[in-house]
Image: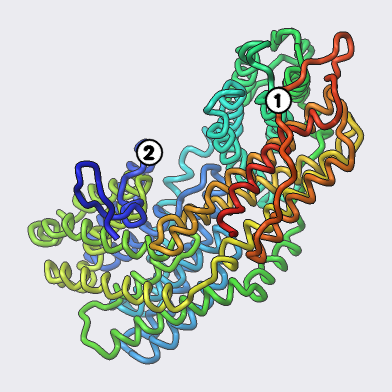
């Protein structure tokens, strides 16, 4: 339903227009130049050899590699480009075999869609591999390919190899730079988080830290899974990243400082984190070996539990920097990766035994089967585009199916506007080379702006390359728009409306699990004696924040869908934020206990954990919450007793901030649960 805009004008609802606003993102100039060369060079070689169709196929392979080149580390880029290209080669070979055989094509593409959907649940590389397997099978079944059957797969692999070579050209000079930049970026995010302690920006900075740490750990640990043995450089980077976790926890505790009495947190603390960040990015030790970390950091004398925690955490991070050998002795907070055989078994179980895997595979197979059957019966010109559209729209890890259908239609229409003058005015031949180079530059530049803009950039490139294979020229434009609308319609009806996952299955149960894990984290946080922290607690906290990030992402997808899903997501959204604050308050309270504040009574901790467990059960069952206990006012961090560093008062004082956040979460949930 349209909404009233300022001035009484009607405007489309936010859930419909959310993805149409370009995201602020810098232009990746290196990727822009690489895309122009990678797509235009194979076509130029094909034209010079008198085989423009061969050049077009190689450029299609390069296009797939350009789209899939999303990693930062060079070793990961090899894996992210090479593995999906192999799956794509298999896909185009299967499609070529059934080209022109209508019902055989329906059967084969339906089976390929089932396999593609199921392997997509394994991980990000498997997801892209499944995408290319199906996309290239659709293209092979819909466009005439050179014979014999193995020609097209080899040409696609050759185009991908061009991108891979261009991508790795700087590896000898920049090896390790992306990994160091990622860890240094996490340090800088933490510095901003420390600086925001006790300010309105605190929650926003905490979210930025969580996202940065997730990205850095993903990069380093994925790197380690490719090289199961530990390399000294990688071990040291992981140790530096691990050393950042106590700083994050201390910064959470700094939120509770009595600013009115002590004033803002001294700038020396965030400055020290930035100094360490610069050292990480340069790949140097800071302080130098043998130098006293305390003197190097120039930290002021701590005045309370939070500052003592920051002081200790920063000294530890500096000591890890100054002693390379300490990387081997540093406790691995996230654990080491399993052996390759065990990872393979886990991947197989995820693909074959997961209900979500089968559900998505069957949904994708149904839609692809319908699309291919439709175009085999009705005369839709160049109708492979219908199944192509279904494939892109139904990628669940790329966003909401509904919003992607809307954005796909919008992006295709915009891309066709770009393609019209190209197909109508540019003569086929050598003019295609600079034209393709120019169009290729739009792909990396537009991809960062959002899915609709990426679609708008890719559409004219595919149309130009397709025209070199089927020679339809300007006649391709309107059929491609119709095909996209048909594909979006199939995805919406057969892939979205006919598979109504309940709120509890999709989001409610995941949120309930996160709240239950938070209750267990509260109990664990205060189970160890002060100063004798369990090694598993930071690991539990990181896993909990990662789970909450996944829940947050699912909510953000749901917010882009029409009512009732979008409306319900908006109502529950504050609870996600409240649970994140409960986790942070737990960590902050534990840090204060470790640095002088008296430990809370076990019965009080159990009561708070019980409140969270009751909330989790209510979320899972949809039953109303019982009335909360009487509120206990929460004050700022108590002042340390003179000469002892301990805060006066009972354990109730230290638990007050945590209790306040738990009651806020329950207050948010109660009206929604009824």
Q: How many marks?
A: 2
Which image quarter is the C terminus in? bottom right
Secondary structure beneath label 1: loop
Task: Say which of 564 and 161 sits in front.
Answer: 564
Nearest to the observer: residue 353 or residue 40 = 353
Q: Residue at x 36, y 50 (%)?
A: 450
Q: Regarding mark 2 in the picture, which secondary structure is present there?
A: loop
Q: Which residue is mark 2?
A: 25
Residue density around tag 2, few if under 14, some if 14–19, many if 20 or more, within 10 Å: few
**Front residue of 233 and 626:** 626
Towards the viewer: 606 or 324: 606
Q: Earlier in the sequence, mark 2 or mark 1?
A: 2
Looking at the image, residue 475 lies above or below residue 554 = below
Horizontal and vertical percent position of residue 667: 62, 47
The image shows residue 614 at horizontal and vertical percentages of: 74, 56
Q: Is residue 147 left or right of residue 478?
A: right
Residue at 26% x, 71% y: name it: 485
Q: Residue at x 37, y 77 (%)?
A: 493
Q: Is residue 560 above or below residue 103?
A: above
Q: Is residue 173 visible?
A: yes
As drawn, the label of residue 635 is 1
Tell me the quarter of the image containing the N terminus. Answer: bottom left
In-image side of 269 versus 574 (left or right): right
* Residues at marks 2 and 1, CA–CA distance in whole angstroms: 41 Å
Residue 67, quarter of picture: bottom left
Q: Which residue is pictured at 74% across the width and 30% down the height?
A: 246
Mark 1 neighbour density, 10 Å: few (under 14) some (14–19) many (20 or more): few
| Camera-nearest label, 2 or 1 | 1
């Amino acid at each position: 339903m349209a909404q009233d805009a300022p001035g009484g004008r009607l405007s489309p609802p936010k859930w419909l227009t959310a993805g149409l606003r370009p995201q602020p993102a810098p232009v990746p100039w290196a990727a822009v130049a690489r895309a122009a060369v990678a797509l235009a060079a194979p076509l130029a070689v094909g034209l010079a050899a008198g085989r423009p169709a061969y050049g077009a196929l190689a450029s299609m392979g390069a296009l797939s590699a350009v789209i899939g080149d999303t990693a930062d580390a060079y070793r990961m880029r090899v894996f992210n480009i090479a593995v999906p290209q192999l799956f794509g080669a298999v896909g185009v070979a299967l499609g070529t075999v059934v080209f022109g055989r209508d019902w055989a094509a329906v059967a084969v593409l339906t089976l390929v869609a089932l396999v593609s959907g199921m392997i997509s649940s394994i991980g990000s590389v498997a997801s892209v591999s499944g995408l290319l397997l199906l996309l290239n099978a659709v293209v092979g079944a819909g466009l005439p390919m050179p014979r014999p059957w193995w020609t097209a797969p080899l040409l696609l692999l050759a185009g991908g190899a061009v991108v891979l070579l261009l991508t790795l050209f700087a590896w000898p000079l920049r090896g390790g730079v992306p990994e160091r930049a990622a860890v240094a970026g996490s340090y800088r995010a933490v510095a901003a988080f420390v600086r925001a302690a006790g300010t309105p920006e605190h929650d926003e900075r905490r979210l930025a830290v969580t996202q940065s740490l997730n990205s850095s750990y993903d990069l380093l640990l994925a790197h380690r899974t490719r090289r199961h043995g530990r390399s000294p450089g990688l071990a040291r980077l992981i140790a530096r990243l691990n050393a950042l976790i106590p700083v994050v926890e201390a910064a959470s505790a700094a939120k509770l400082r009595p600013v009115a009495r002590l004033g803002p947190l001294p700038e020396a603390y965030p400055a020290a984190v930035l100094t360490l960040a610069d050292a990480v990015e340069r790949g140097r030790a800071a302080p130098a070996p043998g130098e006293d970390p305390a003197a190097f950091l120039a930290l002021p004398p701590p005045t309370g539990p939070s500052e003592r925690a920051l002081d200790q955490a920063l000294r530890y991070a500096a000591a890890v920097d100054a002693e390379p050998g300490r990387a081997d002795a540093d406790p691995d907070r996230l654990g080491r990766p399993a052996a390759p055989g065990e990872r393979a078994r886990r991947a197989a179980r995820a693909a074959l035994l997961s209900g979500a895997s089968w559900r998505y595979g069957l949904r994708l197979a149904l839609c692809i089967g319908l699309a291919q059957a439709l175009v085999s019966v009705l005369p839709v010109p160049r109708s492979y585009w219908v199944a192509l559209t279904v494939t892109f729209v139904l990628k669940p890890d790329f966003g909401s199916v509904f919003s992607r259908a809307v954005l796909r239609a919008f992006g295709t229409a915009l891309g066709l506007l770009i393609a019209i003058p190209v197909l109508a005015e540019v003569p086929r031949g050598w003019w295609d080379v600079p034209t393709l180079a120019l169009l290729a530059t739009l792909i990396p530049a537009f991809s960062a702006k959002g899915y609709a803009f990426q679609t708008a950039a890719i559409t004219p490139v595919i149309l130009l390359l397709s025209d070199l294979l089927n020679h339809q020229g300007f006649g391709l434009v309107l059929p491609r728009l119709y095909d996209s609308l048909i594909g979006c319609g199939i995805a919406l009806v057969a892939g979205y409306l006919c598979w109504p996952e309940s709120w509890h299955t999709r989001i409610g149960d995941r949120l309930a699990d996160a709240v239950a894990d938070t209750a267990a984290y509260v109990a664990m946080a205060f189970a160890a004696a002060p100063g004798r922290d369990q090694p598993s607690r930071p690991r539990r906290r990181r896993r909990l924040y990662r789970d909450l990030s996944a829940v947050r992402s699912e909510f953000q997808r749901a917010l882009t869908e029409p009512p009732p899903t979008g409306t319900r997501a908006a109502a529950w959204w504050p609870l996600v934020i409240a649970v994140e604050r409960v986790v942070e308050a737990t960590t902050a309270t534990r840090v204060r206990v470790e640095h002088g504040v008296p430990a809370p009574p076990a019965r009080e901790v159990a009561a708070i954990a019980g409140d969270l467990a009751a909330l989790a059960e209510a979320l899972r069952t949809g039953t109303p919450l019982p009335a909360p206990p009487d509120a206990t006012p929460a004050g700022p961090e108590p002042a340390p007793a003179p000469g002892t560093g301990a805060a006066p008062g009972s354990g109730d004082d230290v638990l007050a901030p945590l209790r306040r956040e738990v009651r806020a979460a329950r207050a948010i949930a109660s009206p929604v649960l009824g």
